[in-house]
Amino acid sequence: MLPQPYGSTQALKAARFDGGFSKPRSLNLVVVFSNLVIPWSAFSVVFWALSFSLRFSHPIIAGFVVLTFVLAAGVSIFAAFRWSNSERAAHWYHYFAASMLLSVLAAGLLGSLNYRYTMEDAYTLMVDLKFYKDVDVGQMKGQQMMDAGLVDFDHGTLDLRRSLGFRDGGNTYCVAPITNGEGSLPVYDFWAVGVNCCSSTRPDFECGEYSNPKARAGLRLLSADDRPHFKLAVQAAEATFNLRSAHPLFFEWVEDPVDELTKRRSQGYQFFLFCMLAHFSFSVVGVTASIFKYAQLD
């Protein structure tokens, strides 16, 4: 084949075929947007389903929502290995699959932690248990209020002189009897409690709003892990101060139980929003880095 003159039509065609005059690689904005928004949306929905009222009231539906996104992550992983036959084609498939998988796993972990340590007790206190007002501890017994969640005590006060700390497993479990300020009671079934807010050697209870003169209410302790330790502390107080407790109920001592419950729910919502923003920020960084990586591929 004879050489073609510079600038001839044949030369331009050959240059295009050889890649000498190829167009710059374009970036598909739909692909970029999808890799940014879809994993973030999956994270937010799974986190929400595992953290809030849907899980408490309709756990099967919450599980179905989570399973849907787990399957979506699985499909994206399959697509990354099935439909990518070149390094350039594989790039966004692989990024999307990894991002979806990490988003669903992170949402599952963080959402479950938020529910376990913040929202579950709040929903139980609001929905499953009752709010008792003007309770006279001299008249009521623990067995009569086994369904109590929030309690407002009539003339309730703490008998700090008969408080006690029981040390077990590196923690000190503190108890103080709730009284009506009218002297000794035949039965002490209502106790303010806390962990590591007293010593085990003297009555120095400093748990909850113990120093607030307006505090006359309690939020029921729901932790099954801590309850046996507090029972042992009450038994020690019975032996030490010659008291009797038939059916002890444990409370966090507060001024306004409804306000305290609202604060706890707000903490759960704030943690959810913080994690959403943090995930979106990491997604922006990840997609930006992936764009630069894509630009360097042959």
Image (cartoon, grey):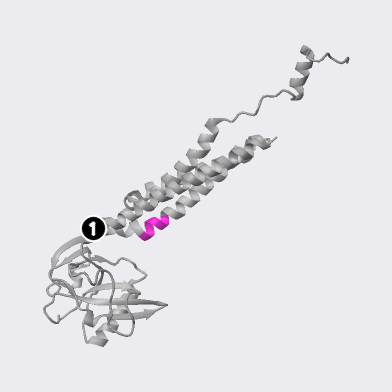
Indicate the position of residue 128 as horizontal and vertical percent values. Answer: 25, 58
Taking the view exactly as shown, the residue that stands out farthest to the right is 2
Given residues 271 and 61, the one toward you in this image is 271
According to the image, label 1 marks what residue?
A: 259
Mark yes or no: residue 84 visible. Answer: no
Residue drawn where x is 56% and y is 40% of the image: 288
In the rendered view, tell whether residue 149 sits above or below residue 141: above
Position of the N terminus by quadrant: top right
Residue type at mark 1 is Asp
Whole-percent x, y for residue 96 in the image = 56, 41
For the point 12% across and 73% down, the residue is 139
Q: Is residue 48 magenta?
A: no
Residue 250 falls in image quadrant: bottom left
Q: Main secondary structure of the magenta part?
A: helix
- Residue 183's place in the image compared with 101, above or below, is below
Q: Nearer the viewer, residue 261 or 237?
A: 261
In the image, taking residue 26 as reference, residue 235 lies left or right, namely left
At label 1, counting other C-alpha atoms closer than 10 Å, the crowd grade (few under 14, some 14-19, many 20 or more) is few
Query: Residue visible at 45% across and 50% down?
Result: 107
Residue 80: which quarter of the image? top right
- Judge whether residue 114 is colored magenta: yes
Q: Foreground: 262 or 109?
A: 262
User: Residue 132 location in percent, x, y?
Assistant: 17, 63
**Residue 153 visible to the viewer:** yes
Does residue 142 appear to the left or right of 76 in the view shown?
left
Quarter of the picture containing the C terminus is: top right
Residue 257: percent from left, percent from top = 22, 61
Q: Residue, x 35% and y 74% (percent of image)?
A: 196
Q: Secondary structure at mark 1?
A: helix
**Which stretch appears magenta?**
112-117
> Where, by quadrant of the figure, is residue 83 drawn?
top right
